[in-house]
Amino acid sequence: MVQQINIMQAKDHVDEKVKIGVWLTNKRSSGKIAFLQLRDGTAFFQGVVVKSQVTPEVFDLAKEVKQESSMWITGVIHEDSRSKFGYEIEVEDLEVVGESEDYPITPKEHGVDFLMDHRHLWLRSTRPWAVMNIRNEVIRATYEFFNQEGFIKMDSPILTGSAPEGTTELFHTEYFDRDAYLSQSGQLYAEAGALAYGKVFTFGPTFRAEKSKTRRHLIEFWMIEPEMAFMHQEQSLEVQERYIAFLVQNVIDHCKYALDILDRDVETLKKYTKLPYPRISYDEAIELLKANDFDVEWGVDFGSPEETFLADHFDQPVFVLNYPKAIKPFYMKPHPTRDDVVICADLLAPEGYGEIIGGSERSVDYDYLLDQIKKAGLDPKDYAWYLDLRKYGSVPHSGFGLGLERFLTWITSEDHVRETIPFPRLLNRIYP
């Protein structure tokens, strides 16, 4: 009996006859040979149908079958050094399972708008496949890293009554007779978790109710947010850089085929596993930018050009420390010797991808936090539970957030993952 396998298992069945369920992505043929480009969800490879080696019916079917038709194919696996995958199948028989007619995404260039309107089909193509597989590996490695570091995974609510980052970016809804919002962040809840369990992380969708004006910003994205009790900022930075290096190394180790599809240079990625990452203060960053003809003044937040220059200057991810208090959220700990900055850091990725992590040490002073909440125009009643954390055995604690999609744009070297990741809920189609 012929063994049924998937394409990714082809390396284990060289010179063996196997059966695989596939879809046709493309084809070409001469008078004597048909070349079928096939996929099955695990990988992409080529099926070769030689006219003299199959029945006339099989060869005619190989020439006539339409793009994205599903099939069973039976044949012998061979090595193929010319392909990125490294193997192909010499087809002896094929059987159409589901016919396809006029598949809209043809093997030609399509515009971004067209592909976004057809995301439900675009995810079948090679680049989305590669990005999604790397995304899957990053998620798997995230759980491995935090598990081995002694963290507990907790889930923060998606509907919330409070705003960590500011009320102007909240999606409003009604929760029975109360106002509620789609979550901007799981951080505040993670702080409660850290004071219960020591080290926790959350991982879930977050939302920003602002029109996306650049290719860097999404309305919905996924965020990994660790929070750590009895930990100051410098210790948190060490966790952050170990985490990033761990993710990059695991992508290198486990996603070679996907990186090849994306033409991502592995040698470049290897640089980002070298620790420690450089650190500069916000003050130093301003001076460095001014020395290189940037028109910036102390107190402004950095945009894409500034972030790109700073990271590329070091040719490594770089931590920028201690931003002005006025441009950061209320919960960050004030600097012990300066009133104008807070103890925080952004990690900027090189190659033009900007901030991938934002983090800080959290303020533990009840009165200071209450004052900051009021200055931010927030209702202290909504944060009574958060302030409680400072009343009952508070400790120094720090945390950070990694935006998964932003991280993926950097690792995959894609212009923007919203073109390749199929379902950030289609919300981003509203605000292109």
Image (cartoon, grey):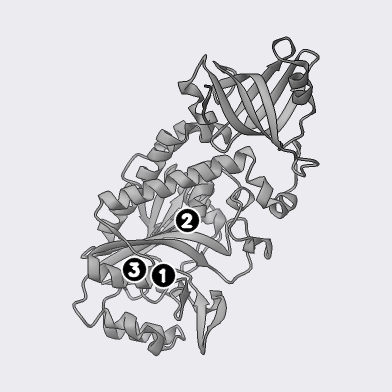
Quadrant of the rendered image containing residue 263? top right
Q: Are there few (<14), some (14-19), or many (20+) residues within 10 Å of tag 2?
A: many
Residue shown at 24% from the left, 70% from the top: 196
The disc at residue 190 is 3
Q: Are there few (<14), some (14-19), or many (20+) residues within 10 Å of tag 3?
A: many
Residue shown at 72% from the left, 31% from the top: 26
Q: Position of residue 275 (x, y in %)?
A: 32, 42
Q: Position of residue 50 (x, y in %)?
A: 71, 14
Nearer to us in this view, 5 or 177? 5
Nearest to N terminus: mark 3 or mark 1: 3
Residue shown at 31% from the left, 45% from the top: 276
Residues marked 3 and 2 touching at CB (< 8 Å):
no
Q: In the structure shown, which secondary structural element does the residue marked by tag 3 occupy?
A: helix
Residues marked 2 and 1 touching at CB (< 8 Å):
no
Nearer to us in this view, 181 or 352? 181
The disc at residue 355 is 2
The disc at residue 324 is 1
Nearest to N terminus: mark 3 or mark 2: 3
